[in-house]
Image: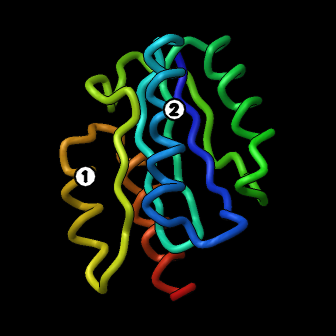
Amino acid sequence: MERIIYISTARQMPDAALVQDILTSSRRNNRRDDLTGLLVVGGRRFLQVLEGPRAQIDAAYSRIRADDRHFAMVELSRKPIEERAFADWAMGCEQLDGDDLTELVDGLTEKLADADLRAQFRTFVELHRKAA
C-alpha cells in the first residue's frame, strides 16, 4: 500500500457545485478501487492525499492528471505505508476559507501519526494564506 500527496490549481475559483462534483466522482471511484484520502480546497488550490494499493493509486493519479478542471499538478510525496491515515474516508473534504485556517487543519491532522503528513497540510495552509 502507498500514499501520494499532490497539489494543483483550479482553472476557476471552485464553487460548491464544482467541489461536490469532484467529491461525487472521487468517492464512487475510491470505493470501487479501495482508495481512501482527503481533499483540501483553499482558494484555487487543491491538496489531495490518496492511500491504497499502488496500481489503483497510479490509475487514479493518471485520471486526475487528465482532468482539465485543474493544472500545475505537483506530486509532493509518494511513499509506501503500513497503515492508512484516512481509513474511514472514501474521500473526506474540507474547503478552507476565513482567517484561522491553522485551527481547522490542526483539527483535521491532530490524530495523524505521520509528522510529514501533518507538515504537508500546514505548508498548504501557509501557501493559501500567502495567496489570499
Where is residue 25 shown, x and y percent of the image?
53, 32
Where is residue 19 shown, x and y percent of the image?
48, 53
How far apart marks 2 and 1 lie (CA) works out to: 19 Å
Where is residue 29 shown, x and y percent of the image?
54, 21
Q: What residue type is labelled 2?
A: Ser
Q: Which residue is drawn at 31% across and 30% down?
A: 89
Asked where in the image residue 106 lies, by quadrant, the reply is: bottom left
- Per the image, the residue denoted by label 2 is 26
Q: Around disc 2, counting alpha carbons within 10 Å, would you say few (fewer than 14), some (14 to 19), or many (20 or more)?
A: many
Viewer-proximal residue among 29 and 109:
29
Viewer-proximal residue among 78 and 57:
57
Q: Which residue is drawn at 69% across and 31% down?
A: 61
- Per the image, the residue denoted by label 1 is 108
Q: Is residue 102 above or below residue 57?
A: below
Instruction: Please state if 99 lies on the left or on the right of 43 as rendered.
Output: left
| Element assignment for label 1 | helix
Instruction: Please state if 124 lies on the left or on the right of 67 as rendered.
Output: left
